[in-house]
Amino acid sequence: MDLGLRGKRALVTGSTAGIGLAIVKALAAEGATVWINGRTQERVDAALKEVQGEARGVVANLSQAAGCDTLFAAVEEIDILVNNLGIFENKPFLDIDDADWLRFLETNVLSGVRVTRHYLPAMLKQQWGRILFISSESGVQIPEEMVHYGVTKAAQIARARGIAETIPASGVTVNSLLPGPTESEGVSTLIAKTAKQKGISTDQVESEFIRDVRPSSLIKRLAKVEEVAAMAAYLCSEQASATNGAPIRVDGGVVKSAY
């Protein structure tokens, strides 16, 4: 299937590794020119070396308004925006203080608000655009081990629908993508740390996590970043024009719902 992305200009935030970088690779493989975003030049340069296709880099910390201004100065207009930037951590609710809540809201919520607000007008003017928020199954089934993360992911789902409601029949679609547990850089690092602490293999940690923490998974494993990226590329494509305002699950069946 030709996704109709050749010549399109795309930006993927927080994309130097994991799901973000996999999405960059998928879009570039379809012929889009893709901007990689990260917080350090070293990380951006390393990511650029992994991409086959047309890719560029911009260093900007989008969890802060000043960082967004840096991005806007470097990247003028785009056709596709993938708001992937996000952080997570395991922390009991009673230990999550105001600073933690603000850090998660700034990074996972406000970054996407600022970036979308900036690039949406040009998409509306040209009557074509794709905006995708990388949310999570945790936005539907709030995890007890990281309530603050789940709340921000639920906000992403609501935001995507809300923005889509404001621009009907515009040629611009706004959707959210809900991955389940995925072999991203952050998850792999956490698994490796846990394995070392327990003196067991990473495969055993993954197996125990699926069994004990995400028992509703139907694939009974972590998803590959490429599996998530494939769905993201489709939602950014010309072919996905009738999918709008929707939370699309690529969660391995973790969410126990028939619809």
Image (cartoon, grey):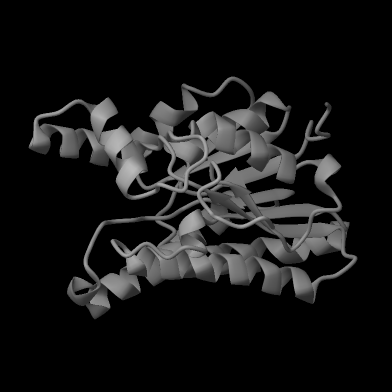
Residue 165 visible from this viewpoint = yes
158 versus 136 height, above or below: below
* Image location of residue 55, percent across then percent down: 59, 31
Q: Could one spot residue 66 in this view of the protein?
A: no
Residue at image point 81% right, 46% down? 240
Q: Is residue 103 left or right of residue 229?
A: left
Outermost right residue: 169
Against 40, residue 154 (above or below) is below
Q: Position of residue 73 (x, y in %)?
A: 56, 56
Nearer the observer, 14 or 9: 14
| Residue in view at x 55 percent, y 30 percent | 226
Residue located farthest toward the bottom when viewing the structure as drawn: 98
* Residue 236, percent from left and from top: 72, 44
Find residue 171 and report its image quarter: bottom right
> 90 or 169, which lies in front?
90
Q: Quadrant of residue 30?
A: top right
Q: Quadrant of the N terminus?
A: top right
On the picture, is 13 further left or further right than 99? right
- Quarter holding residue 108: bottom left
Q: Residue at (26%, 70%) from the top-left corner?
A: 100
Q: On the rendered image, what quadrant is the C terminus found in?
A: bottom right
Count the labels in the image. 0
Give 147 or 76, whichever is nearer the viewer.
147
